[in-house]
Each structure stands twice: as structure tokens, then as C-alpha cells.
């Protein structure tokens, strides 16, 4: 689908296919401090070695589409080590969407003998360090520099003014790269840097074909092997799991609002078909986006999910290492704030059931997040109640159980959330996922076909996830009523 490619403009060096040994410690020579070295503890899996080979074969461009938890960070750092060996790579530039991912990348980089500059937030804390190291590189008194930054810092003058001085042998890695398809971010990516790698379990942008195209134009196309959830579980990169769908009814007030939104969506589709002669298409219809978002928020914040949560956890008060994913609110009903469900969940668990939990939001400081992570891993905290900041890249492998109150219609968030729970951990044999799925209300003839089309894609994700679970038969039976009600037995 995405064929257009920006001309490859590499610096004057040739890349060879890497010789990546299967044994531990591919590079035994002792480099200078801060220069890339494969740690002895790291052994690349076969699919990681193949991804490396294909990136080099594609002249140092490409996108790795790998399931959450499959080791994209390690693969990128292994490529940096190989580039250092082959061509004397001088700079590794990593761009992350969030501050906590900068800290995570820093921890991984240190295992590879790197001493990264963390370029985000206060300019004074990193800009002089960056300009000094660029000078040292250009004067020959320093061999290598690692810079880890955030998307928001990338677009600022502080970093943009320095990028033009980066040497030709620079390698840029876009982490959770789907975010970089947004116009302002894509325009800020350095064109002089020829070696480019995008990492994402879901590089395709939701409702944004142009942004997806821009992403592939800059970084290069998706490279084989794509590494799916099934592959990750089969190869031990992610753990097995049990999946329990919990079907939830809407309240009467919510049902009325839901019906009105579904009718408006149907009318918008019909209007486009009559005026353009095109078949209705949810993805290509800009007018539908706000309606679909409203509908998704209404489903996410459904009131009966709180009753279902209370019933579920009342008999599981001893459960530890549990993550609760909450909705970011439904302003359409009662002007609820974005923290409404999060606060209600924390009150039910902590106040009513005596469950030891803490909230984890975008406002939680980096220092506090690290404290919460340690308390969670040790079991001092039984659970974390979070909104979206745990969707992308956060590494808390100790999570054993997830209760998903907000099943996102966005396939990227759906994939990120399940991968977050399935990361391996020494004390985790298998994960357990409780997924609250809202049952649409009874609809009239005018809206039932619209609902079928809206539900088809979402149901396909639930069914796929059920099929890969260790209790697949039990999980599929729970979804069967929904499939029967809307004639979607073919999903």
C-alpha cells in the first residue's frame, strides 16, 4: 500500500551484511568508555538477527514491526554495535514519545557500554553537554556520542539548532515511531541523517494514511520478519495467558446517548455515499472521527464497569501484581473529568476492598514512577491504576494480571496493552487478563447495520486474542452471544 520512497541519500560509506554470532557476546574487543559493545549477557533471538540482516540489506533504512515485548530496543542497540564495528558510527540518536521511555532507554544503553545524554526538559541540563560532545567528536578527541530525547524536545529550537552539526555517521532510532508520523514531528526529523530505523508494534497510524506514508517515506518500509503476538508466545518472548471477557451492559442514559451517536454516524456515512458515490468507509471519513471518538469514550467510561470490577475483585483481594487500565473519560455524559473512572476505581479497590493500590498518570513524576515500579515489583503495592501513560513502551514485566476497563477501539492501544502484560518475568509463569467488553443496546433497523460494521473490526481483535489464550474455548464461548446478536459468526 505504501510504495512511495524518498531517495536514499547516504553518506559515503557502504554497509555489509552483519555477521551476528549466535553465541553470547558477539564483540569481545574492549571499546573505549561510551562506545557501543554487545554485552555478554545478551543473546539475540533468530528473528532479531534476521531483522538486523534485512535492515543492512535495505541500505540502513527500515521499520521493525514487532510485538510489544519482543526486544526491539535490544535489536536497535545491536545494530548500533554492528555499525560501530563496520563504519565507525559516531552518533546514536534515539527519539522517544515520553520521558519515562528516555529513562528506560538509558538503562538499556548502559548495558551496551553507552553513556547517553538525556536531552529533554530543562535546556540547561543537557545543551552545553551536547554541544561539548559534538565539538569533541568533530575534533577527534571523542569517538562516540549517544543522545536520547523526546518527541517534544525534538521539535524545539534547542535540539534543532544542534542537529545540523551531527556528523554523517549518525544513526537515528524512532521508538514507538507511529507518533513521528504527525506533521510537526515528521518535519523535524533530520534529513541529513542517512541511517534510520523505526520501531513499533503498530507503525500504521489510526485514521491517518498520510501520516503513515510520511513515516515510511522517512524511515523506510516494514522489514521482514514481522513478529506477531503468536510468534512471540511460541518463541518464549512473551508468556502464555488466560483471557476472560466480561460483558457489561450500558445504563439507560448511556444507551440513549449511544443510540444517538450511532444514528449520527450512520447518517454521515449515508450522506457521503449519496454525494460522492463512494462506498461508506470509516477510516477515510474525516467527519466521522469526532463521532467515533465520542462513542469510544462513552463505551470506555460505562458506569456498570465499576460494578463488574467490584464483583471481580471482591473475591480476589489477595491478588498481587495487577494493572488496572482505565478510560480517559466521557465528557458527553455528565461532564465527567478525564480522571473520573480512575478515581472511582482507586476508591473501590483501596477504600472499599482494602486493596493496596496507587494511581499512575501522566502527572506522576519520573521519581515517583520509579518508586511505584519498585513497590509494585516487590509486592508492597498490589496494583497500579493507570490511564494511557502505560500504553507505550513502559517496561514493568512483573505485571501478572490486567483488568482492562477501557478496551480501546484503536488497534495500536489494544496491541500495546496486551503486550505490556505478557512480558516475561522470573516469577511469572502465565498472565491473566480480564477484559470488560460493552454490549451495545438493542438497536432499530436503521442502526443495526452501522453497528455491525463498527463492531466487526473490534470483535475480530477480541476473537484473535481469545484464540491465542490457553483457555481459548472458554473465552470464545463468552464472545459467542455477541457474535450471534449481530450475525457476526464469520468473524
Image (cartoon, rainbow, N blue to C red):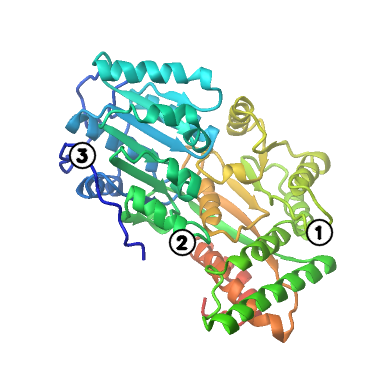
The reply, left or right, for residue 479 in relation to residue 101 is right
Kindly tell me whether residue 86 is visible in this rendering.
yes
Say if mark 3 contacts mark 1, CB within 8 Å. no
Total marks drawn?
A: 3
What label sits on residue 209 in the rendered view? 2
* Residue 91 placement, left or right of 294: left
Is 121 situated above or below 65?
above
State the image quarter where residue 269 is shown: bottom right
Q: Residue at x 32, y 51 (%)?
A: 220
Q: Earlier in the sequence, mark 2 or mark 1?
A: 2
Query: Percent position (x, y) of residue 80?
Result: 29, 34
Determine the residue positioned at 60% across, 42% down.
389
Give me the residue at 48% from left, 30% from top.
Answer: 157
Q: CA distance from mark 3 to mark 2?
A: 35 Å
Q: Secondary structure at mark 1?
A: loop
User: Which residue corresponds to mark 3?
Assistant: 20
User: Can you see residue 39?
Assistant: no
Nearest the viewer among 466 and 413 is 413
Please give the residue where the numbered disc 1 appears in the rendered image: 333
Q: Earlier in the sequence, mark 3 or mark 1?
A: 3
Percent position of residue 354, x then y? 79, 39
Amino acid at each position: 500500500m505504501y510504495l512511495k520512497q524518498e531517495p536514499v541519500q547516504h553518506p559515503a560509506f557502504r554497509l555489509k551484511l552483519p555477521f551476528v554470532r549466535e553465541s553470547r557476546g558477539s564483540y569481545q574487543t574492549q571499546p573505549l568508555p561510551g562506545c557501543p559493545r554487545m554485552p555478554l549477557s545478551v543473546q539475540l533471538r533468530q528473528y532479531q538477527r534476521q531483522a538486523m540482516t534485512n535492515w543492512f540489506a535495505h541500505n540502513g533504512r527500515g521499520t521493525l514491526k514487532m510485538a510489544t515485548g519482543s526486544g526491539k530496543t535490544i535489536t536497535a542497540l545491536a545494530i548500533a554495535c554492528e555499525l560501530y564495528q563496520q563504519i565507525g558510527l559516531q552518533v546514536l540518536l534515539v527519539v522517544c514519545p515520553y520521558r519515562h521511555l528516555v529513562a528506560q532507554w538509558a538503562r538499556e544503553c548502559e548495558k551496551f557500554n553507552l553513556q547517553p545524554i538525556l536531552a529533554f526538559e530543562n535546556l540547561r541540563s543537557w545543551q552545553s553537554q551536547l554541544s561539548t560532545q559534538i565539538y569533541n567528536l568533530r575534533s577527534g578527541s571523542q569517538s562516540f556520542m549517544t543522545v536520547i530525547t523526546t518527541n517534544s524536545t525534538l521539535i524545539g529550537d534547542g535540539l534543532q539548532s544542534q542537529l545540523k552539526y551531527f556528523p554523517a555517521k549518525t544513526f537515528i532510532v524512532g521508538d514507538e515511531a507511529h507518533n513521528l508520523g504527525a506533521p510537526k514531528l515528521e518535519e523535524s526529523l533530520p534529513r541529513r541523517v542517512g541511517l534510520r530505523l523505526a520501531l513499533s508494534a503498530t507503525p500504521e497510524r489510526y485514521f491517518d494514511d498520510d501520516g503513515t506514508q510520511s513515516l515510511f517515506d522517512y524511515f523506510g518500509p516494514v522489514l521482514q520478519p514481522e513478529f506477531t503476538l503468536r510468534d512471540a508466545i511460541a518463541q518464549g518472548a512473551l508468556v502464555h495467558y488466560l483471557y476472560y471477557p466480561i460483558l457489561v451492559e450500558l445504563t439507560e442514559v448511556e444507551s440513549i446517548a449511544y443510540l444517538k451517536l450511532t444514528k449520527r454516524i450512520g447518517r454521515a456515512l449515508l450522506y457521503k455515499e449519496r454525494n460522492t458515490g463512494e462506498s461508506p468507509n470509516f477510516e477515510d471519513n474525516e467527519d466521522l472521527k469526532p463521532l467515533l471518538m465520542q462513542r469510544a469514550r462513552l463505551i470506555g467510561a460505562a458506569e456498570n464497569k465499576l460494578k463488574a470490577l467490584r464483583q471481580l475483585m471482591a473475591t480476589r483481594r489477595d491478588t498481587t501484581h495487577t494493572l488496572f487500565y482505565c478510560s480517559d473519560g466521557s465528557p458527553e455524559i455528565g461532564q465527567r473529568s478525564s480522571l473520573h473512572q480512575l478515581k472511582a476505581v482507586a476508591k473501590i479497590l483501596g477504600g472499599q476492598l482494602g486493596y493496596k493500590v496507587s494511581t499512575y498518570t501522566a502527572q506522576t513524576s519520573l521519581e515517583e514512577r520509579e518508586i511505584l515500579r519498585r513497590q509494585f515489583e516487590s509486592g508492597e503495592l498490589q496494583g497500579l491504576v493507570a490511564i494511557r501513560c502505560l500504553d507505550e513502551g513502559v517496561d514493568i514485566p512483573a505485571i501478572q494480571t490486567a483488568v482492562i476497563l477501557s478496551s480501546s477501539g484503536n488497534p495500536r492501544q489494544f496491541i500495546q496493552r496486551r503486550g505490556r502484560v505478557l512480558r516475561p518475568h522470573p516469577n511469572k509463569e502465565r498472565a491473566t487478563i480480564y477484559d470488560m467488553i460493552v454490549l451495545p443496546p438493542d438497536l432499530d433497523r436503521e442502526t443495526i447495520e452501522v453497528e455491525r460494521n463498527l463492531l466487526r473490526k473490534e470483535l475480530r481483535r477480541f476473537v484473535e486474542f481469545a484464540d491465542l489464550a490457553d483457555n481459548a474455548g472458554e473465552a470464545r464461548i463468552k464472545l459467542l452471544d455477541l457474535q450471534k446478536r449481530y450475525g457476526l459468526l464469520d468473524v
